């Protein structure tokens, strides 16, 4: 371990971040996206209930954040 790492404590975060690799993961991302926008822009959120075209583009990397305690998308 180098000196810089020794001076910066490592913290265990309550969530994980991983690359979406399945349709189920992509559905979780769409649901999270919907919930995030539904509070503030409900009209727009209604367009986010399913995956977007860019989500399945081979040049796109979609990440999923999940709570370690409940596997709830969004870390909550």
Image (tube, grey):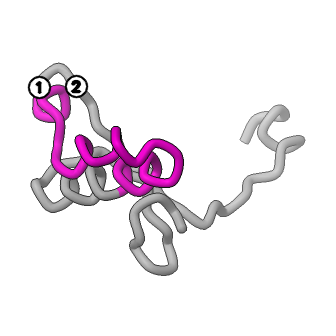
Number of marks present in the image shown: 2
Secondary element under disc 2, as helix, strand or loop, is loop
- Residue at the spot x=22%, y=51% of the render? 49
Left or right: residue 48 versus residue 65 is left
Q: Seen in the image, is 23 located left or right of residue 15? A: left
Give the number of the disc on residue 57.
Answer: 1
Residue 38 % position (x, y): 42, 52
Q: Answer whether labels 2 and 1 touch (C-beta < 8 Å).
A: yes
* Label 2 packing within 10 angstroms: few (<14), some (14-19), many (20+): few
Assess whether residue 34 is covered by the magenta stretch. yes
Residue 61 locus on image (x, y percent): 27, 31
Question: Relative to 3, is 73 on the left or the right?
Answer: left
Q: Main secondary structure of the magenta part?
A: helix
Q: Quadrant of the N terminus?
A: top right
The residue range painted magenta reads 32-56
Marks 2/1: CA distance? 5 Å
Mark 2, residue position: 60
Outermost residue, right direction? 7
Q: Is residue 44 above or below residue 35?
A: above
Secondary-structure class at tag 1: loop
Q: Quadrant of the C terminus?
A: bottom right
**Neighbours of disc 1 within 10 Å: few (<14), some (14-19), many (20+):** few
* Residue at (17% x, 20% y) in the render: 59
Q: Compared with residue 43, is residue 28 higher up or lower down, i.e. above or below?
A: below
């Amino acid at each position: 371990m180098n000196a810089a790492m020794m001076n910066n404590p490592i913290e265990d975060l309550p969530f994980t971040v991983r690359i979406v690799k399945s349709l189920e993961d992509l559905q979780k991302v769409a649901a999270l996206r919907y919930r995030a926008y539904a509070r503030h822009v409900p009209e727009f959120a209604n367009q986010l209930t399913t995956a977007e075209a860019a989500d399945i583009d081979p040049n796109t990397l979609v990440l999923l954040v999940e709570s370690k305690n409940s596997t709830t998308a969004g870390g909550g």
